Image (spheres, rainbow, N blue to C red):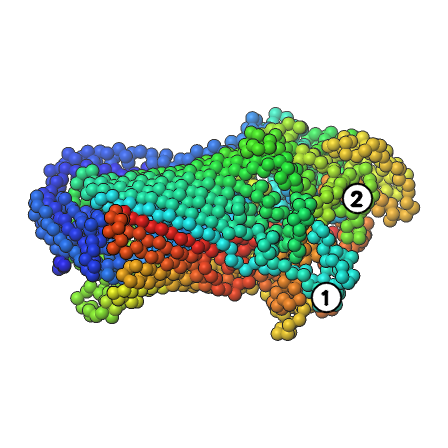
Amino acid sequence: MKKATSIMMMNTRPMAGRLSRLALGATIALSLAACDTGKLLEVPEPTFATPISLRTIEGLPILYAGGIGDFQIAYSGSGGDAFLTASSLFSDEFHTSDTFTTRQATDQREQQPTIEGNLSDAGFSRLQYARRSAAEVAEVIAEISPQGTADTRYAVMKSLEGFAITALAEGWCGAVPLGTARGGAPAEEGAPLSTQQLFDEAIKRFDAALAGTAGSHLAAVGKGRALLNNNQPAAAAAAVANVPTSFVYNIEHSSNSARQYNPIFALQSNRRYSMSDKEGLNGLPYRSANDPRLPFWQDPANGFDNAVPLFVSDRYPSFTSDVVLADGIEARLIEAEAALRANNTGLWLSTLNELRANVRALMTARYEQYAAKVPAPGTLAPLTDPGSQAARVDLMFQERAFWLFLTGHRHGDMRRLVRQYNRSPGNVFPTGPHHRGGDYGTEVVFPIPFAEQENSQFSHDMCVLTQA
Amino acid sequence: MKRGLWLIAVLCAMAMTAAEVAAQTGAIGGVVTDQATQQPLAGVHVTVVGTNLSQLTNTTGQFLFPAVPAGPQVLRIAALGYTADDARVTVVSNATQRVTFELRVSAIVLDQVIVSAVTGRAERKRELGTNSASISARELELAPITKFSDALVGRASGVQMQQVNGSIGTSQRIRIRGANSISLSNEPLIFVDGIQFSNSKGGFGVGGADYSRLNDLNSEDIANIEILKGPAASALYGTAAANGVILITTRSGQAGSAQWRAYAEAGTSQDHNPWPSNFLSLETRQSGASVFDDRGRLNRTGYTYCPNESAARGVCTQDQLVALNVFNTPSLNPLQDGSRSQFGLSVSGGTDVATYYVSGDYTDEVGVYSFNTQDRMSLRANTNARVRDNVGVGVNASYTRTKLRLNQNDNNIFSPIINGVLASPWVPTQEQRDESPIGARAGTGFGYYLDDIENLTPRQTVDRFVVGGNTSWQPLSFLSLNSNIGLDFFSRDDGSTLQPGRLPIAATWTPGNRSNQRSSSYIWTMNAAGVASFNPTEEIAATTTLGTGFTREQFESTYCSGVGIVEGTSSCSATSSLFAVDEDYTQVRTIGAYLQQSLAWRDRLFVAASVRGDDNSAFGQDFGFIYYPGASLSWVLSEEPFFPQTDLLSNLRLRTAYGRSGQRPNFRDATTLLEPVSATVGNNEVSAVRLNRVGNLDLKPEKTSEFEIGFDAGLLNDRVALEFGYFQKRSEDALVRVPLPPSYGLSGDAINTGAIWNNLGSINNWGTEMSLSARVMQTQNAVLNMRLIASTLDNKIERLGLDAPITHNRGSVQMHKEGFPTGSFHVRRYEIREPGKQRLLTRDDVILVDTDSVTFLGRSLPTNTQALSGDLTLFRNLVTISGLFERRAGMYLLNDTERFRCNTGFSRGGSGASQGMGNCAGVADPTASLEDQARFIAMRIGAVDPTSPDPTSPQRVTTLAGYVEKADFIKWREASLTLNVPSSLSAVAPMLQGASVSLSGRNLATWTDYTGIDPELNEGGGSSNFNQGEFNTQPPLRYYTLRFNFSF
């Protein structure tokens, strides 16, 4: 074995005399250095558009459709949970038939700590998103459309902005901030607004819509809804006075893409929710009333959890079933309630009975496959005066609940019963033993999502979940 | 912008000028043998010091350098497991000098050679200030490797390969020296023969587990795995290397006659895990009544459901307990014994001019579900050629075709596990099984038998080509120009077909459906470097490396789905409604340039410094180049004249290094984008857009800096090798996905909305690593080698940049919180009133401890790990026995399987459920421990808040604290017994050079206090960044394998 004792100097030859090669090398070096190497990092973007690229007259229909779609996702849902299902579950319309803790907590009115997330969080975020989207599109329409704010699309966008704020006010506690964004980037934080302030904000949007298109029935019903929520029934009735009963504005659903699916059908098909009946003692008899406005059927299989009996509402029998956002029925119900508040019992009853007399036609005009699902004649007997004001109020709200079933109104109405009619939450919301064990809680509103705490003007302490 | 290509230009210039320089040369040849056995040693690295001339010995131990500059030279030998050696040779022009080396066995590996995937430069371990880990082919040959990722289990300190799922074809989770990034991946970068290799985990979701591309590698082809554990070692790898780099080298041929190698193995896989029993506790109303009806529904006339807590409060009296373990009941057990077979053949050889290695392998495996199957075919051809005396080229090419069927599992009602652990404690007859409807199958947790579930099995077919070429041109003896270029491409076909009527449970299921995704992934790698070596003085050797690199990562996919499929077909075109299509495209490019200067003094003191600059297409447009510096110091102290020469401390090296690497943002994270969607307006489907993501134009990469220091020692005349090191790694500008307040209106349904990426955080990882290798015994008939590796790890978020922690896992059980370890567990603790007395607990017996807020409970990553392995060779290599044990400790895991079992089982009992009333012990077994009972009460009913204003009606707080468990374990990972056919038998079969038969086992035993199924599981699969929770996850399987090896 040989062992080296020292490192030897390498015998390298000098590089003199190679000037020509050096010159050529230098030339190549300079040539390459002259290239714009940044091009090597350019990558194509075939999938997405940028906010600025669509701010044109040609881009306007696409932005407008985006605003429509964003509202559908927020209010109704994209085949999954949004405001509509959260509202239905929290009220007495639906109960959970799956195993998700967030759904159980919402159903039980004992919601999870905000840090753990809640079912209503998606609705809150998407309504805020839809509000921002509609406002931005309305701004572009006003700027680019030759008709400016008189463009009927402007009225639709401002109305949808108003409805989004109305839904936020009906569902969540009285501390909802409305921040702003510009070009897809955060702009200004919003200060938390009380429930009344939110409805006031919504009314401003509806008024802006009406200022552009005075005959916008969509804006009129929205304004009436917000005013009724703000305990101004007479003003609400005035707002909807010109809305014909035949008017319907649908949140349109489609089987074209999964995000357009009707969420109630999709979730009931997946056996997540079961239609309630007298849920939690105070709940309304949605099934046992055998009312033609509330068709349903029982699935022989159980719910998703393989335990809870599954009752499926037939109001939305397919992925393509539209959801009524605002219509003439609601306008008449607003008028009826205003009449009741004005102690005009005769007008109150006649208004309700006029709707009931046309139940089949009205429902057929609104709900897919209704005539096929509900055997004729499917009539409703006229109502009679129950005799006391309290009973009249009960009847009024049951009529609203049955007509407006699964349209995102019931939770707001329950809160109104507490705020405007001095009912105790324990006599309005589901209470007593819950079907999953334990008792119903005492909460009456949704919490603001945990992420809102990044808003320096907001604190979760501001959100009182037991205050209607 | 004019960026780093000037470096390429400089390299070209160097080459042009150097090409004309010639030298008078001679040859050096020789042979390397084992001193003890006198057997030739193949694959030994031979280098002419001070030049870039190096090669491996052939199968007869021979080497030959045909053109070495005339004059005195030093020849250096480095072989894994042997002492290094030098020889001084005087090269005479046009003559050949011959040298013989006889090497002594050594446990210390200072002269092991590591080839950089970026520079192509070969460096000995003694030259590096870092402690990289090596796994050799020999180690793998002894081990029962069922998939490539097994090779990384328990073999390198600081490297944790977490076996998160046991289903065939699923991916595992790799962590090296902790976790650097809160929001980006913490998986290391992988190179195979210098080409960047994708470890993506995509495919159709099955509930939790994801797919493995790492295991596309055929472990039989592996020659060596080198693991650069962090930026101190991987600074030259730039923007992507912050989590460490795994360098995989496949086998190559050696000059000599053709060497054939064949193997065949067959084995079985089994589930030996501790599945829980299902309980139902009852109060009898009608004596003698049957508990269940013929559909498995509880007879509620005869019995009242009476859970423990109700019984404790006197609401009911438990007088009957029904219990059943589905997994121990043959007629119900969904698990079968799996099978595995593998066959392979390779040939290698060549001449001094060209070598080759060609292999083929076929593996077929069936898991513990009959519909979890995988077959894989691998082909490889590696060639190397010396096309001129000073030009070497190599081409490595491989093709793998993998076909996988993966079962539904984890968070999924079609999981066989969830249908078992929540099943009624009742055994239906075959008739009862047949009569119960799908979706409400008798006795199951969620209403599905295995036959139903089999209808919904995603299939994945992957065709993968990895092709790379490398060149090494030595225009001058002191200058080497290295380059490599390659492509890792795979085409992935994911499909799922549900035939009509098989699962009539929902609108999209009853008529059948089909989904399909075709994806293509491309990673191009290009590197070029010039390495110049020169000796400024007699005692100093200097090496300058200048290079550039470019990578392009591109992924494309198209997707279709539809409902209502024609029976027997499996194509989107065969569906009739609810069509959906999608197309995806991502591309990221990186360009970098670097300079490294190394100095060696007397071949025992090594200093190096480097800097790399990168730009990347995913950086924000307002951000430019980023620089990654590195420095290294290594001192082989024991070779200093003043160092006492003793057998006790026969070798000592001190080392330290510093380096920085980065991690880029994801594609599109820097840009605000609108996503085209469709909307219905006036009954028309029209084009629309929605905000897809909120961009940040200032986005830049995370920077992770690492410092490490340590020593390598040879003890007892190098029979024992000890390596010890300490590292500290700090990430700055950590990319955090900052939640936006939803009130901005930027938080929609698109997954990327609601947050903005920002460079905010700072994370610290630090720890120690130790490796102890020893030849414990060496006699004529017995050789025993033992190896112990150990590491410690701590981790802390120094700065999060947010007011509130980022929470995850069941809402908020884990969180990233400033001042605490990443992804650590924080819970509200409780205690048991009057513990120690076995009884049934009421809801008032569980008292909240943390009345104000959550308390830190523990970490998600192990804080200390040890692995002990050994091999005993008996009777002159006739028999070899080997084994591997691994311990991990200090981490916690959410036992979500049990939480869900208790919660759902309880709900079903309370709701009068007719099906799936199996329950956990804490709810329904009166003999359950107090801890079991208390954690259920705390989770479901709530612990009593002692600060409640009204003690008679106390407030209750629910907490998952009881289900977050310590997950320490010791596992017996591997054992094998190999019988080598005596060489005397070669007389019988002259062509046979060697043969052996091995019997081996994998995942043989687990020792743990964790009460769930397995403490290594993870519901999120290999891509789970921090979530630590098992949720009806398939645990690792036990394998027994019989294998035959032949060489001829």
Image quadrant in which the N terminus of chain B is located: top left
- In the rendered image, which residue does mark 2 sit on? A287
Along the line of sight, which residue is nearer the eye, B531 or A238? B531
**Cα separation between marks 2 and 1:** 38 Å
The nearer-to-camera label among 2 and 1 is: 1
The image quadrant that residue B945 belongs to is bottom right
Along the line of sight, which residue is nearer the eye, B410 or A4? B410
Can residue B413 be seen here? The reply is: yes
Q: Chain of mark 1?
A: B
Residue B652 x, y percent position in the rendering: 25, 65
Which mark, residue B104? none
Residue A169 x, y percent position in the rendering: 70, 46
Can residue B734 be seen here? The reply is: no
Do discs 2 and 1 belong to a common subunit? Answer: no
Look at 56% across and 29% down and name the residue there: B573
Residue A337 x, y percent position in the rendering: 83, 41
Along the line of sight, which residue is nearer the eye, B988 or B688? B988
Can you say whether B575 is above or below B404 in the image? above
Look at 48% across and 37% down and name the residue there: B493
Residue A140 x, y percent position in the rendering: 59, 32
The image quadrant that residue A410 belongs to is top right
What number of labels is visible? 2
- In the rendered image, which residue does mark 1 sit on? B319
Amino acid found under the numbered disc labelled 2: Arg
